[in-house]
Amino acid sequence: MAKAPVLTPQAEDFPRWYQDLITKAELADNGPVRGTMVIRPYGYGLWERMQQEMDARIKEAGASNAYFPLFIPQSYLTKEAEHVEGFAPELAVVTHAGGKELEEPVVVRPTSETIINDYFAKWIQSYRDLPLLINQWANVVRWELRPRVFLRTTEFLWQEGHTAHATYEEARDYAAHIHRNVYADFMANVLAMDVVLGRKTARERFAGAVNTLTLEGMMGDGKALQMGTSHELGTNFSKAFNTTYLSKDGTQELVWQTSWGSSTRMVGGLIMTHGDDHGLRVPPRLAPVQAVVLAIKGDDAVLATVRETGERLKAAGIRVQVDDRTDTPFGRRAVDWELKGVPLRIEIGPRDLENGTAMLARRIPGGKEPVAIDGLAALLPGILEEDQALLLSQSRERRESRTADVTTTEEAAEAAVAGGWARIPWATLGTEGEALLADQAVSVRCLVAEDGSVPESDDAPGTLAIVARAY
Amino acid sequence: MAKAPVLTPQAEDFPRWYQDLITKAELADNGPVRGTMVIRPYGYGLWERMQQEMDARIKEAGASNAYFPLFIPQSYLTKEAEHVEGFAPELAVVTHAGGKELEEPVVVRPTSETIINDYFAKWIQSYRDLPLLINQWANVVRWELRPRVFLRTTEFLWQEGHTAHATYEEARDYAAHIHRNVYADFMANVLAMDVVLGRKTARERFAGAVNTLTLEGMMGDGKALQMGTSHELGTNFSKAFNTTYLSKDGTQELVWQTSWGSSTRMVGGLIMTHGDDHGLRVPPRLAPVQAVVLAIKGDDAVLATVRETGERLKAAGIRVQVDDRTDTPFGRRAVDWELKGVPLRIEIGPRDLENGTAMLARRIPGGKEPVAIDGLAALLPGILEEDQALLLSQSRERRESRTADVTTTEEAAEAAVAGGWARIPWATLGTEGEALLADQAVSVRCLVAEDGSVPESDDAPGTLAIVARAY
């Protein structure tokens, strides 16, 4: 009789597979307040690595980290009309504090454009203060009706960048720079995720933006996930908050702004991109643990070799963990590391010692083979890079094979409902077609140019719409 | 006529000096909601370095980072009687969210013992799951009546550790390990702050703890600042949340717990320990910028040398920043770097180039001297370590010279009110003396043994009380 699978198979029930994986790989739990989540150490380790890699790229782009308050006076939200309309239904409101009712209720930040502009208006005096490039790592709250761990949670962790520039062109170029050189670079080269870079239609734009750039990934079930966005805010917030600067010519000018964000939702995207029926597969460049060295049994010679091998691999620059918990059956530990998606398992038992070999199990392509223990430190870096590349190419292949070129709105809807993406000329679809798709819970994920670049405007000739169901 | 000082002198008005420094060095601003703060990039850079150094030590102590929700059901807080009594007056409460009144109001976390125990109770099954060592970096909210930036803010950033152990001894030892090997090590060796390690009296203990270990620093005005605490929680929370484990003997046992925290308040402590009338002085090991290379004037040869020197120092492992903003007067920039407390300034102008020298200004001991540009990379590391040591010894000297050994409660109160610390036998002072001190806003900061170690209990023979006014 076949063993019952550890996870519900993806083909049987993808959402349940996702939830099973998150629970069994100990990534996260649901919180006690509806829609909140507890991120467990292994899940948080993935997020910490994402933070490190993103933070380095954000600093490379010239931005500095800062911290703005969690609580925003309710009146701030109403200063930018589209912004408040977009966020009002999702706000959490503190009405009582310190044992008293507050005179003015305060809102728990859903995003920080308003409070940050309040300070930008104070800090920016002259052209010498520009560009002002700020990033914040923080928690934000948006009350979710249909929460799902990592993907849509009432509270989530993110980074939000906020910048002010002297000219429209500078702001536009900076939003594009973040889009491509921070977000896309990180997603392709660290997360090993193929993402499509495009611009949002007016319907899908951020509340308060004049242009939203997005990165869309295709998940294992063919649905789309928005992995990050970078917005041109024009002068919408600087008008509302009177954020002006003295130009070189001595005139007072409004600043041009951008904002851009990416969140713990990326952990959900990672799972749904690389996970399989045995669990998660973590790209080696991201992995907090790239290789685990397992003692099969608790014999002294085995334990000594396992620990020594761990030390040698660590010295070779590999992020390694030693698993010498031999009071837990080996099989259970092996399944657990497989669930957690650690790229490489190096299994050592008494018989291996005799031959000077270990069993090397590769989670990403699958398969096991004996290798010389002495050769591991030289062997593994190349294997890790191979597996990193494999994940990216699998992700690209999926997206390419499951994207259909279509010519009518009906065909686009059909392709999306069937679990794929459709590519259709935007001139054919248009805002009317977009509205029709919405009735079937299908949306335009983004607009792209024929050559795959990001179009300069919605009506640039040859613009294509990527159509899909989305998380 | 003498120039007006940039800051209110410490001797004239210490609190105003503190506020002046924070504003003028661009460390932080007050937030729009009472008691909240905006941490500006330079202030946040100090916090980021604190986080890095602390995080490495916390991981070295075996704890893993995780993340628990901001929102806690109000009912959780009431499960541990002393805990709710301690925190109830400071809570911020969300009553409305998503456009509706909530059925059960949720509290914004003031600390996370309750919600974390809810999960520990689920995750811990057997002795194999112990010890469970968790840390969280997060924001917390405690409504403050008398807020002061960094020291007492309605919202602050911190790390909170939470652990569960099989025995009382293990928990006690772990709380002490964090106290000494994480907190004290970091404060002495990175912050260059002399801190006294001791235990809190019952009156000053954390709400829900059976023992609180503390680290107390003496500020520039002689008042005390609690820099961090590590608590033994005994089984108070495990009883309240039924957090039990199956022992090796097959019995169900309550876990023994610890919690420990340190916060952005440390930035306030840093300022008040090392700051002087010219601004902040940042210890080199902490400093995000250890040396700034300034171009005095914008001549091409000067700019080239300044940038090249910056590159060479960076290559030598020094955290360096180049200041080539020659459209701002040199004097203003020099004062600004002095205010910000960057340890070393390397000033290069046209005349220096002729001699192959730069002017080296040392912020910590003060003073300026010409040095050979070619010798800088070899010279600076030693100077930085010297200055690090100097700050620690100055901090120690202040504490020693301003601590009086006294024998009566009256003398203790007098010493504290005059702006110093008093050391008095705890057997002489006792809880009655402690209550009398409270009438004059003086408190027992901690209990120490005669040899400077941490006493095992309040009534260990020879125990001394450190008495002071405190922030």
Image (tube, coloured by chain):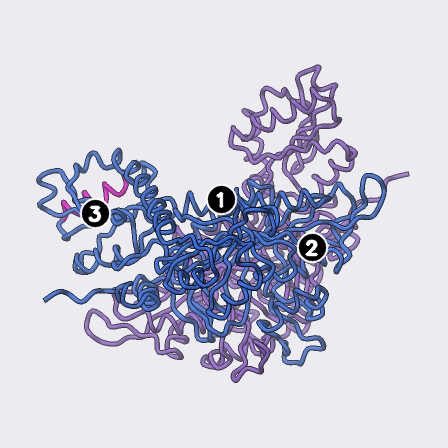
Chain colours: A purple, B blue
Q: Are marks 1 and 2 on the same chain?
A: no
- Main SS category, magenta section: helix
- Name the quadrant containing residue A246: bottom left
Q: CA distance from mark 3 to mark 1?
A: 37 Å
Label 1 chain ID: B
- Name the quadrant containing residue A263: bottom right
Q: Amino acid at mark 2?
A: Asp
Q: CA distance from mark 1 to mark 2?
A: 64 Å
A270 sits to left or right of A159: right
Provide the secondary structure element on which disc 1 rests.
loop
Quarter of the image containing the N terminus of chain B? bottom left
Residue B218 horizontal/vertical position (percent):
40, 55
Q: Amino acid at mark 1?
A: Gly
Label 3 chain ID: B
Provide the secondary structure element on which disc 3 rests.
strand
Q: How many marks?
A: 3
Quarter of the image containing the C terminus of chain B? bottom left
Say which residue label 2 marks.
Answer: A221
Q: Is residue A214 visible?
A: no
Numbered circle sitting on residue B361 = 3
- Name the quadrant containing residue B13: bottom left
Q: Residue at x 28, y 46 (%)?
A: B291
